[in-house]
Image (cartoon, grey):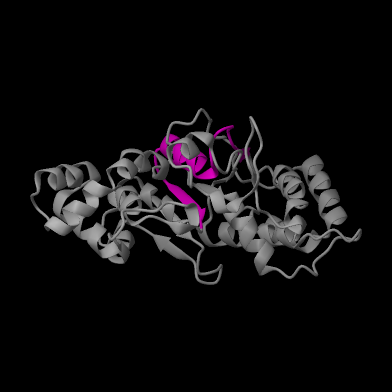
């Protein structure tokens, strides 16, 4: 089975933007640090893990209304403008905002498919494509929410970038267990109880990672934990009260935290192969215009036939 690499693209181009000096500019003065940095990130990933295909998963809607309807605080602090009938505008630095169309053009010129869907986040696209692929998947992200996709039996792993591209971490079932004391298939329930301030998810007040892990170890899943709290069995009265007090939150939060695995998207069948003549000429012209020719050369070397 071919190995597919799914990129949480925004996670990576934000990392590139903040990791590469903003003095990196094209001839016309446009900042291209995120463009060049993202291409170098992809080149390193391809070199290290040698996928057969790479897909750039896209945030067509970084804050879907259906998640906001369930938890109004979801990502509220990142909103700079609300748009009636459309996706809210996320706080993105202007020098990065101007590079996003260039990034899309660059990826297209390299035959790296971009996949998104209205009303869904890149996480949902990653989850759906990982499900469709069946197995042999590398998910590249700095977002631990995607740990819920890890599945050793299907060889779905996360290449975690949070500590930087020089300290990549391969997340498997064993690693999730070691880090949090829960299985990967319990991670969404664990994250629901723990909460995440960066996403505007309050979690269960008074229940931190250790308590959440213990509850899942003892009861298996959130539904069983809630049932035990109602019955007053298998946990202290204090913890049961915390679970019951959070009932309204727990009614809706799992739908927000769990990634959607059935978005109406198709896994592109585009192998990562050297560019043919016309494709190469177009990619080179773009690289010349936006001053990433050396980065392009490195990428082409990385995808050259392996002898």
Residue 89 visible, this orientation: yes
Q: Position of residue 88 (x, y in %)?
A: 63, 41
- Residue drawn 31% across the image and 38% down it: 251
* 129 inside magenta stretch: yes
Left/right placement of residue 109 relative to residue 140 reads right
- Residue drawn 27% across the image and 43% down it: 247
Quadrant of res 11: bottom right
Q: Position of residue 80 (x, y in %)?
A: 66, 49
Left/right placement of residue 272 relative to residue 209 reads right
Q: Position of residue 263 (x, y in %)?
A: 48, 31
Q: Quadrant of the N terminus?
A: top left
Q: Magenta part of the protein: which range?
A: 114-141
Q: Position of residue 79 (x, y in %)?
A: 61, 49
* 237 inside magenta stretch: no
- Residue drawn 89% across the image and 61% down it: 29
Residue 191 against residue 88 in the figure, above or below: below
Residue 42 visible, this orientation: no
Left/right placement of residue 139 relative to residue 299 reads left
Residue 107 against residue 265 in the figure, above or below: below
Q: Quadrant of the C terminus?
A: bottom right
Q: Residue furthest right?
A: 28
| Closer to us: 74 or 290 | 74
Left/right placement of residue 207 relative to residue 258 reads left
| Closer to us: 112 or 228 | 228
């Amino acid at each position: 089975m071919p190995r597919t690499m799914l990129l949480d693209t925004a996670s990576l181009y934000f990392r590139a933007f903040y990791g590469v000096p903003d003095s990196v500019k094209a001839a016309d003065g446009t900042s291209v640090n995120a463009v060049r940095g993202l291409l170098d990130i992809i080149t390193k990933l391809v070199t290290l893990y040698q996928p057969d295909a790479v897909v750039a998963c896209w945030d067509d809607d970084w804050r879907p209304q259906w998640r906001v309807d369930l938890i109004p605080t979801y990502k509220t602090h990142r909103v700079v403008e609300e748009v009636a009938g459309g996706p809210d505008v996320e706080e993105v630095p202007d020098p990065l905002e101007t590079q996003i169309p260039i990034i899309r053009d660059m990826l297209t010129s390299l035959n790296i498919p971009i996949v998104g869907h209205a009303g869904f986040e890149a996480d949902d696209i990653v989850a759906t494509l990982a499900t469709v692929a069946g197995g042999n998947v590398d998910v590249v992200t700095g977002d631990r929410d995607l740990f819920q996709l890890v599945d050793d039996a299907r060889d779905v792993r996360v290449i975690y970038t949070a500590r930087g591209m020089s300290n990549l971490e391969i997340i498997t079932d064993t690693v999730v267990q070691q880090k949090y004391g829960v299985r990967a298939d319990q991670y969404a329930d664990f994250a629901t109880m723990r909460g995440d301030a960066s996403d505007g998810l309050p979690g269960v007040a008074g229940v931190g990672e250790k308590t959440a892990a213990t509850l899942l170890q003892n009861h298996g899943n959130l539904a069983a934990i809630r049932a035990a709290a109602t019955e007053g069995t298998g946990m202290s009265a204090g913890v049961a009260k915390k679970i019951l007090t959070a009932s309204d939150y727990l009614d809706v939060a799992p739908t927000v935290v769990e990634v959607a695995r059935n978005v109406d998207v198709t896994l592109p069948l585009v192998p990562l192969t050297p560019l043919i003549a016309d494709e190469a000429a177009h990619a080179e012209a773009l690289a010349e215009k936006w001053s990433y020719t050396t980065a392009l050369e490195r990428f082409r070397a990385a995808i050259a036939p392996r002898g």
